Image: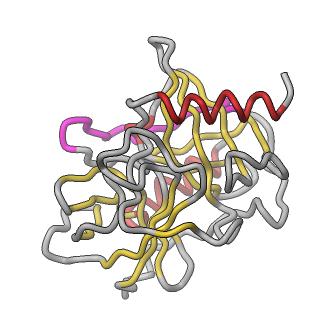
Amino acid sequence: MSIHCELLILILALTLDVQVHTGEIIGGKEAVPHSRPYMVLLEQHMQDGKTKHCGGFLLNEDFVMTAAHCLACSYTVLLGLHNFSNSNGIQRTSVVQKFPHKDYDKTDFSNDIMLLKLSSKAEFSTNVQPIVLAGQGDGSLPKSCIVSGWGKTDKNIPYMSVVLMEANVTISTKCEKEKSYCTEGETGPGNGDSGGPLVCEDGKAYGVVSSGAINKYSYAKIPDYRSWIDSIMNQH
């Protein structure tokens, strides 16, 4: 099947599947094409035969980070994507190993973080680049951050955006929980754009989009998981 046909099928699936889990960049704008070359779209192939979608981000040539609630039987990983109607530079691969955090709790979304090892190495280019993770030493958290994804742009629309969207968010201390960040307001991700990064002023990924309620959004706090992340990546 040609890449053109695969993309056409994907666009139809994104348009028709009201159960897409990539969520909602609400109040955002289109990202400058390929300005976020670490962004990944995950096609989740579920046990019931359905295909869902989550976001993710590239850590190195072997690993992608996403949310633990994005666990699926198998994946198709799209790298270098901006606009679904343009296949130029898109890399497609699969996942050979999944590493959801062992303490992930699906009832309260605590420890909602997962690593995916790619079946073939990502080929770095202008459109495909890894992002640096915030470390445990990054104590002074920048307040102004950005979330991005291909999710819905309006809560009343059941289909995803054809282009990568982004939105500015501000971290709030009022609603944060243990090992998580929180942002408030009408602008941001919904229950989805799940697995995408919370990227702050220094260009590092500080959080993983986890869950959302009305005008409140939660992110797994990457600095608190660095030991676990480094251990998985060094061992595999």
Q: How is the image coloured?
A: secondary structure
Residue drawn 35% across the image and 53% down it: 154
Residue drawn 70% across the image and 39% down it: 118
Residue situated furthest top in the rendering: 48
**Where's residue 205, x and y in %?**
51, 69
Locate residue 212 relative to residue 55 in the image: left or right.
Answer: left
For residue 106, what is the image quadrant? Answer: top left
**Where's residue 216, x and y in %?**
21, 62
The correct choice, above or below, for 156 with respect to 175 in the image is above
Number of residue marks: 0
Between 177 and 83, the residue placed more toward the observer is: 83
Between 33 and 62, the residue placed more toward the observer is: 33
Q: Quadrant of the C terminus?
A: top right
The correct choice, above or below, for 209 with respect to 4 in the image is below
Residue 204 is inside the magenta segment: no
**Where's residue 143, x and y in %?**
35, 84
For residue 136, what is the image quadrant? Answer: bottom left
**Where's residue 199, x and y in %?**
49, 72
Between 103 and 187, the residue placed more toward the observer is: 187
Residue drawn 37% across the image and 67% down it: 27
The correct choice, above or below, for 219 with respect to 106 in the image is below
Q: Give the range drawn in magenta.
A: 94-108
Q: Quadrant of the N terminus?
A: top right
Residue drawn 29% across the image and 50% down it: 211
Residue 100 is inside the magenta segment: yes
